[in-house]
Image (spheres, grey):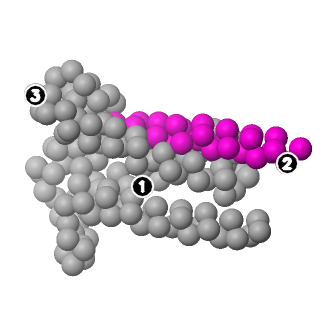
Amino acid sequence: MKIIIKLGLTIILCLYLAVLTKLILFKYIPLTEIIHHFNFTYNEYHWRSNNFVPFKTIIFYLYIADVNLIIRIENLAGNVVGFIPLGFILPLLLKKFQRLSAVMAASFCLSLSYEILQLLFEFGSFDVDDLILNTLGGMLGYIPSKLFIYFLRKRKK
């Protein structure tokens, strides 16, 4: 029974990562055109559109931006919500992720990988605030996972 649960969680994690990758890296690019983006050309506009200043985008969308609420929610809450499943699934799947620091590191590393790929291949733009929000999402997903594990252990006793 335990093996079936682990297999199911592994399949869910793989599907989640595939969907997350599509939403983050390929949201503006049709899948048929992905291969054309694998180049290392210098595009000055692209490099200027990246954000390397922590909290710049977050503050912009919270206090400055003159855009509708849906765009603000997509840009802020979307980054958090997108990584909640990662923080939930990892502790259930592997014991080494039953510590918040491990989930935080995994969320940060996955997010950093996406951001670097966006920067290098112009799939989008690098934003350090996405790293912050994505890592926060992973940490928020960890909380219900730990509660779930706690109640499972308590139920077994």
Q: Residues within 10 Å of mark 2 (few under 14, many from 20)?
A: few
Please count the marks in the image. Answer: 3
Q: Is residue 96 left or right of residue 52?
A: right
Picture coordinates of residue 58, whole percent (x, y): 29, 30
The answer to whether residue 131 shows anywhere in this view is no
- Residue 37 included in the magenta stretch of the image: no
Residue that carries the numbered disc 1 in the rendered image: 113
The answer to whether residue 26 shows anywhere in this view is yes
Mark 2 and mark 1 lie on one chain; the one further toward the N terminus is 1
* CB contact under 8 Å: marks 2 and 3: no
Picture coordinates of residue 32, whole percent (x, y): 21, 78
Mark 2 and mark 3 lie on one chain; the one further toward the N terminus is 3
Q: Considering depth in this image, is 67 or 107 the residue closer to the camera? A: 67
Q: Considering depth in this image, is 37 or 18 the residue closer to the camera? A: 18
Picture coordinates of residue 54, whole percent (x, y): 34, 30
Picture coordinates of residue 84, whole percent (x, y): 48, 45
Q: Secondary structure at mark 1?
A: helix
Three-letter code, disc 1:
Ser
Residue that carries the numbered disc 2 in the rendered image: 156
Taking the spot 45% from the left edge, 47% from the top edge, the residue there is 83
Region rendered in magenta: 128-157
Residue that carries the numbered disc 3 in the rendered image: 66
Q: Residues within 10 Å of mark 3 (few under 14, many from 20)?
A: few
Mark 3 and mark 1 lie on one chain; the one further toward the N terminus is 3
Q: Residues within 10 Å of mark 1 (few under 14, many from 20)?
A: few
Q: Considering depth in this image, is 140 or 111 the residue closer to the camera? A: 140
